[in-house]
Amino acid sequence: MKRTALPSVIIALCSYLLIVAHAQPTNAPGAPGDKATWTNGNKQGIGTSATPASRVWFSLGDGVLTEAYYPMVDRANLRLLEFIVTDGRGFFERESTDTDHRVEPIARDVLAFRQTNTSRSGRYQIVRETFTDPDHQTIVVRVRFEPRQGPLNLYLYVDPAVDNSGLHDTADVSTEALVASQGNVFMAVGSSVLFGEKTCGFVGASDGVSDLRATGRLGGRFSRASDGNVAEVAEVKQAPNGPTDFTVAIGFGSSADGAIDEVRQTLARAPDTIQQAYAKGWRDYVATLEPVDAAYADEYAMSAMVLRAHEDKTFRGAIIASLTIPWGDDADAGEGTVGGYHLVWARDLYEVATAFIAMGDRAAAERALDYLFRVQQKPDGSFPQNSWLDGRPYWGSLQLDEVSYPIVLAQQLGRTDAATWRDHIRPAAEFVVAHGPATPQERWEEEGGYSPSTIAAELAGLVCAAAIAEQNHDADAAARYRKTADAWLQQLEGWTVTRTGPHSPQPYFIRIAQHGRPDAGEPIDINNGGGVHDERAVVDAGFLELVRLGIRPPAYPLIVRSLPVVDRAIKIETPNGPGWYRYNFDGYGEKADGRGWIETGIGRLWPLLTGERGEYELARGGDARPYLDTMQKFANEGRMIPEQVWDRAESPKPHLRFGEGTGSATPLAWSHAQFIRLALAVKKGRVVETPELVRAYFQRSR
């Protein structure tokens, strides 16, 4: 980005002092303000330093900076930071809603982004580059504001949501920066150019936006707004001629002085120096990765960085599902109890860890296993459905695949020592034997019963546990685990395959049988408003886990016969390639009118399922490249791969486009992990995460 130089004296002065232009009254009226929400879950970029010292994360959406996280990756502190442009004569535009947005990675091997926002009125353009300061708790936004028609006024608008809540914040603009706080978390926003008029207030009541909309200037100006949904506005002084280049720094700390000091120290350094240090951290990391084919190298590098960016820096190895709140613009941000997807699922962590192993970052996979065993695992050997970073359970159910996958991961990492066996592997395996094969919830976190995908994980986990037991001289446990696995595999089809279903006269796998009677036609009440249906009519592709984990060969007749059933029921051809629903009648997705999911909706297509199908096609000797191509096309401009993509040509809202990400969660770590594994599988000609020990055991000559 070309920069217009400012006199060094001014730069130095403004780096340390943000001049307050007017004396201001104290308390803003209108508490607590409008209902607090988050922003849409469809992010075009995320970022953090590749080094552990800087414990701040950012997300980008709708052309602006959205949720920022500090001091851990499960603690959001900002809803939105954007610019408002006026002319004092009735012209008013917000950057997020009144400009056309373009986003691009700054480089293929750097987790930083350039956002270009061009006013639809043609009157200005704003270009941002966003990254973090590797040495401080600071997000850095380099900005160029270019007026194109007439003199314009530029205002910085900050909507805090400190400590995972947007309703109990306090704003204070009486110091040199815009400060917001809740409890012992403080956020400060400063700029390398002068702030003029400043105010804060309650959103929708006294936040200054209504004044800007009506007059183009701030009217009532307040220095403090306490305990509510607050916002802050500051006028940005512009260069007298041409575009204005400046830097915004968002700093965090445990006190106002601490947060302001982080801002000061960042602004005291040349932004080029900070950006180069940030870039070097990521370039050094990407250079260590296993290579893939050139056609996939850019998305592969981005996916690797995305996975690393989802790891916490306090609880090392804790990798959250996504730096998003699904459908956050419809989600209540009033209290700090909403976890969104910044939580840890053991299943997602296994998926990510196997991607780390495949791409050569074994240390990250080891940290993930350490976290699973030392933080998440319960005394009875089980794992929570999901948890906060410190291991506190969030949702309270149990999924037996999540108890099994850590065992598989331990075997793949060679973590077979006596202490790991005694304290972690044996308790988990004993729990599976005692409570399986039926699971309270399967991998889609909704229904209980006999699930092909869950049982596949259980079988793999028990065989891995048996091998580890033998290495630790526990022959009795090894024999018992293998005997259980053999018995469950022998009964698997009786529990999960219907011969009387409506989709085919031939037997096929169903999604789940609540009581292990797949021909009984029992009614199943689908969560999320999916309705009540005959179990035999509800299908998914979870049985492909039997192939991925090495339990059945890809040519196994029942698997081959079940594929056409799945494709007829849940496959959609999009402009970007084939996509699959989780299962038919899924209710987890946008409503028909495009509003976000709230308890009910319509499930959309999941890119990771395209990747799973690609792995299966490769395993049976087919070409996986079309599936990898599709996953790559599902990614947005920032190369973020979604959880879900829109499933039809008809769209109730402009941002919902056929074959592109919805408002659920972009990026999803599991989606990026699946892309990485499939890209490496294509390169190596084999499914890279299949545990060889499991394949050898179940597919041996008997």
Image (cartoon, helix red, strand yellow):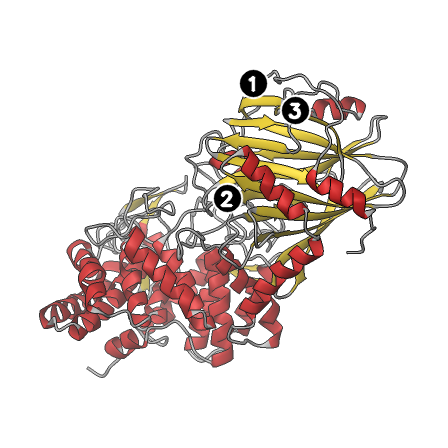
Alpha carbon of mark 2 to alpha carbon of mark 1: how far? 26 Å
Q: Is residue 31 left or right of residue 352?
A: right
Q: Is residue 423 left or right of residue 76?
A: left
Answer above or below: position of 274 versus 620.
Answer: above
Residue 453 pos. (x, y %): 32, 60
Q: Is residue 379 left or right of residue 330?
A: left
Alpha carbon of mark 1 to alpha carbon of mark 3: how far? 11 Å
Residue 62 showing in the rendered view: no
Secondary structure of the residue carrying tag 2 is loop
- Closer to the chain start, of discs 2 and 1, is 1
Q: Nearer the viewer, mark 2 or mark 1?
A: 2
| Residue of label 2 | 70
| Residue of label 1 | 31
Q: Amino acid at mark 3?
A: Asp
Alpha carbon of mark 2 to alpha carbon of mark 3: how far? 24 Å
At x 57%, y 55%, the residue is 134
Q: Is residue 153 left or right of residue 558?
A: right
Q: In which quadrant of the rendered image does the N terminus lie? A: bottom right
At x 27%, y 67%, the residue is 460
Quarter holding residue 421: bottom left
Q: In which quadrant of the rendered image does the C terminus lie? A: bottom left
